[in-house]
Image: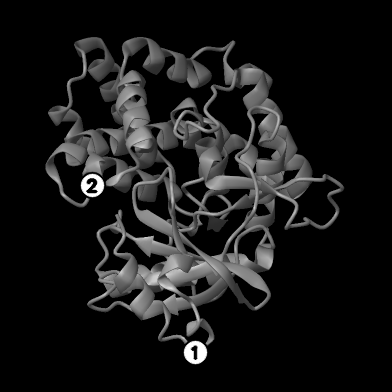
Amino acid sequence: MPDIDAIHATLTQLPECGNVRPDDLEPLSVTGIAHDHIRVRGLILAGKPALLRIPRLSQWGLEAKANLAYQHACFERATPSAVTPKLLGVLPVSGHLPMGALVVEEIAGRKPRLPGDMGAIARCLASIHALPVPAVRAPLQVHDDPIAGTLAVIEAQAGFLDECSINTKARAAIAEELAWARDFSDHIPPGAQPQCLVATDAHPGNFLMSTQRAIPSSNKADHAVLVDLEKMLYGSPAIDLAHASLATSTMWDPDCADILNAREVAGFIDDYFAAAGSGPASALKPWILPMRRLTWLRTMTWCARWLVLSRTSEDWSAGRLDPAFADHLKRTIPGYFTFERIAASRAEWLDPQGLMSFL
């Protein structure tokens, strides 16, 4: 539970926040691992309602100041897309706030409903991916070779698989996917894919459906806003398309959990290409399935990491999460590792009648 008095003491050091009272700070229930979120009732900054985004940990192992600077940069880089919250301020790392905090715009909206809102998520991602890539990309990570970059993340997490209770058939299937990924990485040269700013953590629960954002050329009433930007980097847009629609992502948030069938996934990808244009579609289409396989492996190995660290690490402890969300994860994540669920995921790229038949 966040220390409200400590947070209040830091927040009120900002000149525009001097009248905020402790009772104005309202902790929110969140479906995430790495942050607490606190609404600041009545506080309007730059014409926007304010929300505190307070890191609990860095999933990439960054020290506190570097983690805060990274997230600061993510919000700033994404702002021109008009489909992310605006950054309103930064609370520095201090004794009161050991990992600092960002003050961001609170987006009023609901969680997506699947599959109906997947088109809005596609348009949101297309707006982010269309942003110009700056000459200086630091401090954000750069995956000039998105395959090798993703494989490096997979390899760093794969060791946790041995500490999970996974049945023999399921473990063998994951091993086959790992072998494929290593071989694929060895045979694809760097620079073969389009590069852009990507979310990397684009599961549907990280979007809100809102009327606060209007994407140019779209006449839809509700628009998807990406609200979790902590892991943005420069890499392949195919990773976001995969992470938004894989079952291991769409089941993450209990408020919008569902599993898309192959036709629904293909429709989502078609909506993305309709928004992005024929040029990006032509360059990206050959990478949809291979990056989907890699993103599935990245997610599965991350889940293995969580299963282990949620029991053994204070920072990752399931006890720090909202109890209902923690219960959802404890029920849902082990289901990813059943042979039947793994086989269903692999059918997308191994079965000629799977997703491949729709693309």
* Kind of residue at disc 2: Trp
Q: Are marks 2 and 1 in contact (CB under 8 Å)?
A: no
Residue 328 occupies quadrant? top left
- Quadrant holding the C terminus: top right
Report whether residue 184 is seen.
yes
Label 2 sits on residue = 316
Q: Earlier in the sequence, mark 2 or mark 1?
A: 1
Q: Position of residue 331 (x, y in %)?
A: 33, 23
Nearest the viewer among 313 and 171 is: 313
- Quadrant holding the N terminus: bottom left
The coloring applied to the image is one colour
Q: Residue furthest bottom?
A: 15
Q: Position of residue 36 (x, y in %)?
A: 38, 56
Label 1 sits on residue = 15
- In this rendering, the answer to whether 39 lies above or below 66 is above
Nearest the viewer among 23 and 241 is: 23
* Kind of residue at disc 1: Pro
Residue 319 occupies quadrant? top left
Describe residue 265's horizontal placement relative to residue 349 as left or right.
right
Nearer the observer: mark 2 or 1; the answer is 1
Q: Position of residue 320 (x, y in %)?
A: 26, 47
Residue 215 occupies quadrant? bottom right
Badge count: 2
Q: Residue at x 52, y 40 (%)?
A: 205
- In this rendering, the answer to whether 283 lies above or below 98 is above
Q: Residues within 10 Å of mark 2 (few under 14, many from 20)?
A: many
Q: Residue at x 56, y 12 (%)?
A: 352
- In this rendering, the answer to whether 46 lies above or below 279 is below
- In this rendering, the answer to whether 236 lies above or below 159 is below
